[in-house]
Image (cartoon, grey):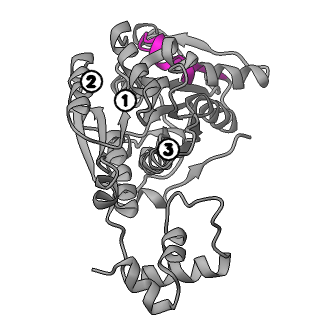
Amino acid sequence: MVRLSDIAKDLGLSLSVVSRALSVNPDKYAVVKKETAERIRKYAQEVGYTPNRQASFLGKGKCATIFCFLPDVPTRLIADLMFGIAEAARELNFPVNFFLGKCCDDLSCFLRDSKRNPHSGLLTFPPSKMPAQMLSDVEQYHKAGGNILILNTISNSGAIYGSKGFWGIPSLNIDEAYGGKLAASHLLQCGCDRFFVLSEGHPDIYNTREQGFADYLHEKNRDFTLVTAGELAALKIPPGEKWGFFADSDYSALDQYALFETKKWKFGENVFLCGFDDIFYSRISNPSLTTIHQPTREEGRAALRELVSMIFGKQGKDQLMKPWLCHRETTGGRRPDPEFPENENRVTDLV
């Protein structure tokens, strides 16, 4: 194993200089020259140096391990989030323990475990309708100096917590309002004459997505109609018109495929459908579903890095990550290759 002293000896530098150059949180009053720091980092990478996180934290009476609570939901969103967290944890040499759950009781167990076991920080999803006592426990952990970053408060806690925040606790979210605007912009570009939002009646969860869609249409002096699945069945598209539909989730969109087929509507011709989330089924469905992609893998990397920076003394801050639109067959695009999603047509900007 390569040690700091080995690097210092090989480069003819002092141990303190090498230590400062490779520190995640260097002393601002002990600056290393830029060219020297770059030379040290490059050499450390060449010889395969990795810091012993556990040893450095144990020396301070702590543990480098990060505890992470995620929903026990087998979807692309959660899998990618775990991949991203694991990738950044490996890069920064921090061990991560994952805890999975679905309800407030599961989060309560996670918080109790975190009190009993040494750790350096928490990454967690907030369950919907979090009881006041549990919210108080999370706040007390933060106020007592615990490093905590909360993920996806908008889509998991709804309007109550998503709009107010968690009272000073840093959070990282996907910008769902921007995703709704991307969907509206895309359907306008498709030449749609009328616009509809397919809603399953969960305003506290998906209202941000729908509000972004509505706001963009309003900016363009266009209107939309909110429809349920039952109301959708009664609609008839006049000859020559194009209708655009935005579903607040991919599941909601995919559920309507059979009805669209029964009505003999043609995707990409007289009907254009956009979902939200980019679950795996949206890529392999027939036709493939145009949808708003939530970049949860990138979110996982960013979350882990932000938490580590907080562990080393940085003030945490709220962050928003922009999603993008995957243009597929339900709005006249190409069918994607499920094995190479990075090659498909992405729309990132509003028009």
Residue beneath the point at 50% across and 11% down: 160
For badge 2, the amino acid type reads Leu
Q: Residue 216 got which mark?
A: none
- Classify mark 2: helix, strand or loop: helix
Residue interval drawn in magenta: 194-210
Camera-nearest residue between 326 and 83: 83
For badge 1, the amino acid type reads Phe
- Classify mark 1: helix, strand or loop: loop
Residue beneath the point at 52% across and 13% down: 159
Residue 301, position as x, y percentages in the image: 44, 51
Residue 268, position as x, y percentages in the image: 54, 39
User: Does the magenta segment cover residue 259?
Assistant: no
Relative to 93, does residue 346 appear above or below in the rendering?
above
Q: Earlier in the sequence, mark 3 or mark 1?
A: 1
Q: Residue 125 got which mark?
A: 1
- Mark 2 to mark 3: distance in Å? 22 Å
